[in-house]
Amino acid sequence: MADRPLAGKIAVVTGSSRGIGRGTAVALGEQGATVYVTGRSTGDGELTIDRTVELVDEAGGRGVAVQTDHGDDAQIAALFERVRADHGKLDILVNNVYKIPDPPAWGGGFWDHAVSIWDDQVGIGLRAHYVASWHAAPLLFAAGPGGLICNVSSPGGQSYHFSSSYGAGKAGLDRLGADMAIELQPKGIACVTIYPGTVSTEFIVEWSGKRDTDMDGAQTPLVVGRCIAALASADDLMDRSGSIQWVEDIGPEFGIVDEHGRSPAAYSRRL
C-alpha cells in the first residue's frame, strides 16, 4: 500500500479531542495508521475523542478512543497497557496533550497568575509527555527500529510568549526531546520536536476575536498533523532526530497542503 505509508503502524496521539491533536490523529489515519486517541472528553459532542475517532475512520485509518486524564499517571499507564494488550507494539507516539489555564495566562506578570498554572502548563505540557514516553518506550522497542516520538512544542520555547510558565514548559520540552533522542539513538528510534506557527485551533479561533488577533493565513490543525505524518515515514527520519522541525519548512519540503490546498503559512515571529 504505497499510497498509505503508515498502513499497519500503531500510533498514540495524546490530547486529541480537538486542535492539533485531532488534526494529527486524522492525518495519521489518512496514511493508514491505527490511532489511539486520548483525552478526557467523550460522548456525542463535537469536541470529544469519540468524534475524533469517527474522523480518523472516515480518513481511512482506524481510530480507538481511550479516555485518559494525563494528569493521572495511573491512567497513562493504563493507556499503554491497552496498546500492549491489543498489539504488543507501538510505532508512533505524538505527545501533544496540554492544559490551558482557566482563565488563560496571557499578559501580566507571573505574580498575577495563580501558582496552579505551573501545574497546568508544565505538569501536563511537560511532565505528562515524559510519563507517556516512559511507558511507550518498551512498546517502541518491540516494534523495532524506525519508530518515532514527536513532541508538539512551540516557538515559546525560545522566546517570550504568553507567560513565564508557558515558556518554561516549552523550553523544557525542547530539551527533553533533544536528550531523549540521544538515549534512543542506539535503538533506532527517533525523537523530533515540532514547531507549528499560529494554528487555528478551536481555542485560538474563539479567543482571537476577544484579543483582536488576525487569523488570516494561520496554519490549520490538519496541516500540522500532515507534517507529523510525513516525518513519521521520512527516509531520513533518524537524521532529523533531536532536532526542532518547523511546520512551515516541512510543508514545502514534502509538498504538504492543508484542507484548503494551501501550504503552511510562515510564522511571523520566527527567530
Image: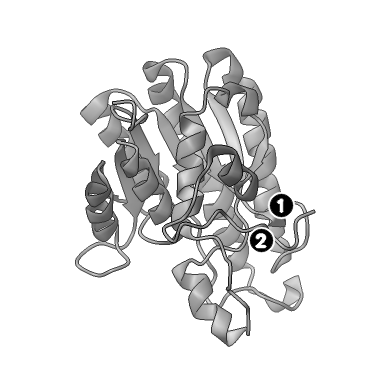
Q: Is residue 114 left or right of residue 41?
A: right
Residue 149 to residue 102: above or below: above
Where residue 166 is drawn, which disc sits there?
2
Name the kind of residue labelled 1 in the image. Answer: Gly
Q: Quadrant of the N terminus?
A: top left
- Residue sitting nearer the eye, 143 or 61: 61
| Position in image of residue 166 (x %, y %) | 66, 61
Q: Residues within 10 Å of mark 2 (few under 14, many from 20)?
A: many
Q: Is residue 113 left or right of residue 22?
A: right
| Position in image of residue 189 (x %, y %) | 52, 22
Residue 109 visible in the displayed image: yes
Where residue 157 is drawn, which disc sits there?
1
| Position in image of residue 91 (x %, y %) | 39, 28
| Residue drawn 46% across the image and 25% down it | 147
- Residue sitting nearer the eye, 165 or 204: 204
Q: Is residue 70 left or right of residue 81?
A: right
Residue 214 to residue 246: above or below: below
| Position in image of residue 247 (x %, y %) | 60, 48
Name the kind of residue labelled 2 in the image. Answer: Tyr
Residue 132 visible in the displayed image: no
Q: Earlier in the sequence, mark 1 or mark 2?
A: 1
Give me the C-alpha separation between circle 1 and circle 2: 8 Å
Between label 1 and label 2, give the one nearer the viewer: 1
The type of colouring in the image is one colour
| Residue drawn 29% across the image and 33% down it | 83
Q: Residues within 10 Å of mark 1 (few under 14, many from 20)?
A: some
Tell me the element at label 2.
Answer: helix
| Residue drawn 55% across the image and 85% down it | 209
